[in-house]
Image (cartoon, rainbow, N blue to C red):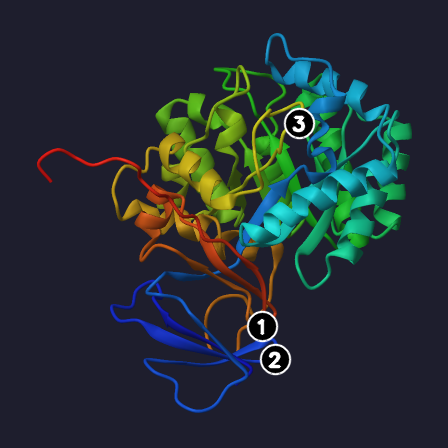
Amino acid sequence: MDLVVRNVRLRGMDEPCDIGIVGEVIRRIEPRLAGACEREIDGDGGLAIPSFVDSHSHLDKSMMIYQSPPAVSGTITESLARSYVAKRSSSVADVVARGRQALEWAVANGTGAIRVHSDVDFGWGTTGVEGLLELKRMFAGLVDLQVLVLPAANPLNDELRALVRRGMDLGADAIGGSPHLEHSPAGVARYVDFVFAIAKEYDVDVDLHIDQNTEAASDTRGAEVVLAKTLTEGYEGRVTLNHWGALSAYPEDEAARVIELAKEARINFCACPKEELIISGMGPSRIKQLVAAGVNCAYAHNNNADMFSPYGRMDMLEAGLFTLHAGEFNTMTDAETVMDMGTVNPARIMGLGRYGIAEGATANLNVLSAPSAYEAFRQNADRRYVIRRGRLVAETTTRTKLHFDVAGA
């Protein structure tokens, strides 16, 4: 063995075990591995999980809050306007510099794969896409980066369509968008038709912001248009909806009907509670209801100190704690559901192969300084060891020293 990770716990197993790694692959998982190896590390009874997967990120704008006018109303409309201003002073080199810092944090925090929704618009062109593709090259082997083209203006016109194609031709991995921000139902339908045409032409997944505001009614809701299109185009399993705050405002019978349609279309859903709680007019969707219906649900870190959220440090475990609260996951066992939403479920969204902790899987894993999913979220546990492709790439150990005595102890 090249590396043996000793004395770790796996979810669903009562006793600690050892994980033996050869090259980039997990070869053996046993209660106690004997024999010589190149290197051993002691997990000290901590939980071993596969690398976190952040399937909805805006890494192109990470740390851009310092280039933006200050927020006043905190609405999504204002956030969009602030982003246009900030991007005027941002170059490919700037995207790379800010993104490199964010990706270093992500690696240290145990995130091994990220899908980035990269803006293309009239002022910025394909600057974000170009910077992210450079970061994808730089961090190969550390983070599996998927770059998604996001048309970041509405209404969609011929100039923006051309920018989308330019971004796809650079080598983007998926197509995104925000159809609900169009100005009419006809505009929503045209937008969705264009996105699916691009997806089929380039053979990529569709990954959309959808119906973000918690409005009781809107004539530009896009979710059902997308669900119907998914079925008619035979794109089941390849479409992800993000945010979907309007679903929480649906009457119960309407929500149940739409969720059943989403299940039929094998839609993926990704919640971003950190932003859904802080942006005025937004809110989390029916996360628990979607999970209970069997829809593949993930959570994401989303924004990182930009115009849409002033906070963030590329920490998926921290983002999971927001998900537990916003989604009303209020039992200890709910932590298991949410841990899946930050690991195996988004790995399905991104189509990651040989993912997980099993013999034959790629050795991408974290050892947490907590024995269970519940304790990991409760403590925001250290990523004691971060292993990527069989190589130890980061260690974190937090130490606290108390300088007081407790009376009567």
The residue shown at (67%, 47%) is 103
Say above or below: 367 vs 262: below
Secondary element under disc 2, as helix, strand or loop, is: loop
Tell me the amino acid under the disc marked 3: Asp
In depth, the one of 352 and 400 nearer the eye is 400
Q: Is residue 296 left or right of residue 188?
A: left
> In the image, 48: left or right of 239?
left
Measuring 82% from the left and 51% from the top, which residue is drawn there?
134
Label 1 vs label 3: CA separation?
A: 33 Å
Whether tag 2 and tag 3 are in contact, CB under 8 A, the answer is no
Image quarter for residue 69?
Answer: top right
Mark 2 vs 3, N-terminal side: 2
- The relative height of residue 10 versus residue 407 in the rendered view (above or below) is below
Residue that mark 2 sits on: 23
Tell me: residue 335, above or below residue 354: above
Return the disc, 2 or 1, that comes first in the chain's sequence: 2
Which one is in front, 409 or 135? Answer: 409
As helix, strand or loop, the secondary structure at mark 1 comes to: loop
Which one is nearer the viewer's eye here, 190 or 349?
A: 349
Q: Return the x and y of residue 90 as percentages of the image width and height.
A: 84, 30
Is any part of residue 237 visible from this angle? no
Q: Residue at x 63, y 29 (%)?
A: 305
- Bin the neighbour count of mark 2 within 10 Å (Cα to Cα): few under 14, some 14-19, many 20 and up: some
Residue ID for mark 1: 390
Task: Farthest residue to the bottom: give it.
Answer: 35
- Tell me whether the residue at label 2 lies in contact with that at label 1, contact meaning CB atoms closer than 8 angstroms: yes
Disc 1 packing (10 Å; few <14; some 14–19; many ≥20): many
Q: Amino acid at mark 1?
A: Gly
**Residue lying farthest to the left in this orientation:** 408
